């Protein structure tokens, strides 16, 4: 976590307001350390010293994510319900409702983009380093099952033809699903090739 930012003002309140304005957060989302109370000096001129504070953002990450997501989805599909649950490693956001296609997007592209936005937005404002996972209508579980099935089918094809098979470009977490689904198959090996966002998995038969 950053040590925060240090800002000055005619008094402590002004110094804090200056810091909040720059950080773009509310007072209840920060910790304030007063470094210098400040002084009006003689007649408000001689010996006057500005107040100085260090302000560190430390918002509740799960609460921030839930509020941010609700506000975002209100512009995409207001007829949704958001549930947030926490584990030691993750903050999991689940969206339910009708017509979730706009939120999921083709091959989960929109869902992944929103998840990325949530992670980036929440990272700056919290010492909590848990990752955020977003799902809608249990799409990710269905996608995992689909990818596992495709990977097994393509592995069989590679073994039958004796030639490497290249899958379609996939985001990192979906490539990992493919690698894990085939890691115990002694007949093939997998590796990722290409550059994001066009990186893909190659399934190679073990001919030895």
Image: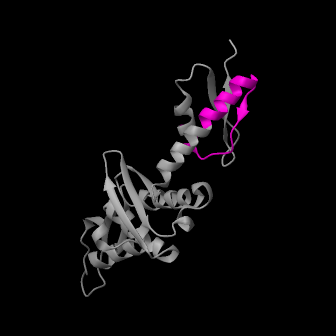
Residue 60 sits in quarter: bottom left
Which residue is painted at 53% across and 33% down in the image?
Answer: 181
Q: Quadrant of the C terminus?
A: top right
* Image location (x, y in percent) of residue 25: 38, 71
Looking at the picture, tell me which residue is in the foreground, 86 or 186. Answer: 186
Colour setup of the view:
one colour
Residue 195 sits in quarter: top right
* Image location (x, y in percent) of residue 54: 32, 63
* Image location (x, y in percent) of residue 101: 56, 65
Residue 27 sits in quarter: bottom left
Which residue is painted at 42% across and 63% down in the image?
Answer: 95
Which residue is painted at 28% across and 78% down in the image?
Answer: 13
Q: In this rendering, would 207 be left or right of 92?
A: right
- Magenta residues, as a range? 151-176
Mostly what secondary structure, the magenta segment? helix
- Residue 157 on the magenta span: yes
- Residue 200 on the magenta span: no
Which residue is painted at 61% across and 54% down in the image?
Answer: 107
Residue 196 in view of the camera? yes
Where 99 sits versus 142, above or below?
below
* Image location (x, y in percent) of residue 51: 29, 73
Q: How many marks?
A: 0
Residue 58 in view of the camera? no
Which residue is the extreme one toward the bottom? 43
Which residue is the extreme one toward the top? 208
């Amino acid at each position: 976590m950053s040590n925060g930012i240090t800002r000055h003002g005619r008094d402590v309140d002004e110094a804090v307001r200056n810091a909040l304005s720059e950080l773009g957060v509310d007072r209840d989302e920060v910790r304030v350390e007063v470094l210098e109370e400040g002084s009006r000096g003689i007649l408000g001129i001689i010996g006057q010293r500005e107040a100085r504070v260090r302000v560190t953002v430390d918002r509740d990450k799960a609460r921030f994510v839930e509020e941010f997501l609700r506000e975002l989805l209100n512009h995409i599909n207001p007829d949704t319900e958001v549930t947030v649950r926490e584990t030691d490693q993750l903050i999991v956001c689940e969206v339910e409702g009708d017509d979730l296609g706009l939120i999921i997007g083709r091959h989960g592209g929109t869902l992944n983009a929103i998840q990325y936005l949530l992670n980036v937005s929440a990272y700056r404002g919290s010492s909590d380093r848990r990752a955020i996972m977003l799902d809608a209508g249990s799409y990710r579980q269905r996608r995992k099952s689909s990818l596992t099935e495709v990977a097994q089918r393509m592995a069989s094809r590679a073994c039958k033809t004796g030639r490497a098979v290249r899958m379609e470009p996939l985001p990192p977490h979906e490539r990992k699903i493919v690698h894990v689904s085939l890691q115990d198959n002694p007949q093939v090996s997998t590796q990722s090739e290409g550059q994001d966002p066009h990186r893909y998995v190659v399934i190679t038969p073990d001919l030895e």
